[in-house]
Amino acid sequence: MAGIYIYSDNNEIAAEIIGFAKRVGKEAVLLAFDEKTAEVMGNSGADKIYLLNGESELVESYAKAVAELLQKEEAELFAVGSTARGRELAARAAGYLDCALVSDVSALSYADGWFLAERMMYGGLVQQRESLDGLGVVTVPGGKFDPVTGNAEVISMAVQADRRVSLVETAPIVRQGADLSQADKVVCVGMGLDKEEDLETARALAEAIGAEIACTRGIAEERHWLPAELYIGISGAVIKPKLYVSLGVSGQIQHIFGIRDSQLIVGIDTNERAPIFKAADYGIVGDLYEIVPLLTDALKKQTIDRPE
Ligand SMILES: Cc1cc2nc3c(=O)[nH]c(=O)nc-3n(C[C@H](O)[C@H](O)[C@H](O)COP(=O)(O)OP(=O)(O)OC[C@H]3O[C@@H](n4cnc5c(N)ncnc54)[C@H](O)[C@@H]3O)c2cc1C
């Protein structure tokens, strides 16, 4: 059975890829490794769900079995959600299949018998388009396609796991900051901030508008003023808030990658040529140390004066 074979440990991404498959007129076959996923995804619009039963808890241990299944069924594409687990499986399956792997695509389409993928290269400086000749593997981040609905047939099959790596222990990750992907409003600080104490200036503004604090990579990874999970960009968090306000952020492409889906971008920077002003809907050229306290006071006053 030809078609697009899909896996993600994130059900939303899996549903979105199924949506893509159906929209380009392909069979959508979802791979699930546990009964709960197969059940939850029963209305995802997939044509089939293969419930792969084996002994390992590590999905990537089934890469060889998945590759053999794809080959046997003459799959056209293996589309995997770009999560840590998904990338593990995708890379190994592509290895067993000896086929192309296009990772973290920013766009995926199908035309005239070809799958076309786009992805950022060189830290976001170049957008590359690639076409896949024959069966290939792609990894797809969330938010790229709309899901569909429809009942799927569930077919169970036993698969052999590669037991050379096994799970020893799992421990929850203790988050140090907010989940930026869900934030409605974000105030982002950049290297234009002089001292760590000055974060309070940004926090006061964030509090006045009910925003989360975020930063550029240098603030997190060079200065260590904020946790790494709070930096935005191509190698950090990708956000889509209603409002993004930057303070002393130059707006390099690697940072813009993470904010370009924001509904309203406001940039404050002393340098009128800073690239942030190309991305911004509103720009204020000036010293953040003068502007931000004034803005915070005005916004607080507006909140207080606003009639119920
Ligand atoms: C492969 C790769 C991946 C990367 N990934 C990321 C990423 O995911 N996220 C990320 O953020 N970066 C990333 N970077 C780094 C990125 O290229 C930039 O260096 C970084 O985003 C710049 O951070 P910044 O804007 O805080 O600092 P700068 O570029 O130094 O900008 C500081 C800004 O502050 C302004 N300023 C100074 N004083 C004031 C003041 N008093 N008031 C107002 N404005 C002031 C300056 O005019 C300047 O525009 C990556 C780089 C590479 C090579």
Image: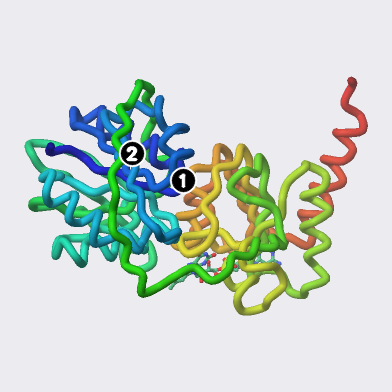
Instruction: Please provide percent x and percent y for residue 251.
Output: 52, 60
Q: Is residue 43 above or below residue 193?
A: above
Q: Label 2 is placed on what type of residue?
A: Ile
Q: Secondary structure at mark 1?
A: loop
Q: Quadrant of residue 93?
A: bottom left
Q: Label 1 is placed on what type of residue?
A: Asn
Q: Is residue 198 above or below residue 103?
A: below
* Residue that lies at the very extreme toward the right in this rendered image: 304
Residue at the (83%, 71%) spot, across then down: 197
Q: Residues within 10 Å of mark 2 (few under 14, many from 20)?
A: many
Residue at the (25%, 34%) spot, across then down: 28
Q: Quadrant of residue 98?
A: bottom left
Please indicate whether residue 164 sits to the left or right of residue 187 in the image: left
Residue bearing the label numbered 2: 17
Residue at the (63%, 41%) spot, across then down: 243
Quarter containing the N terminus: top left
Instruction: Please provide percent x and percent y for residue 200.
Output: 83, 62
Instruction: Please provide percent x and percent y for residue 188.
Output: 66, 56
Q: Is residue 28 above or below residue 223?
A: above
Q: Quadrant of residue 149?
A: top left
- Asked if residue 119 shows in the view, the reply is yes
Please indicate whether residue 253 sits to the left or right of residue 22 in the image: right
Q: Secondary structure at mark 2?
A: helix
Please identify, in this view, whether the residue under mark 1 or under mark 2 is nearer the observer: 1
Asked whether 109 or 152 is in front, the reply is: 152
Residue bearing the label numbered 1: 10
- Asked if residue 253 shows in the view, the reply is no
> Mark 2 and mark 1 in contact (Cβ < 8 Å)?
no
Instruction: Please provide percent x and percent y for residue 42.
Output: 40, 28
- Mark 1 near ligand 1 (CB under 8 Å)? no
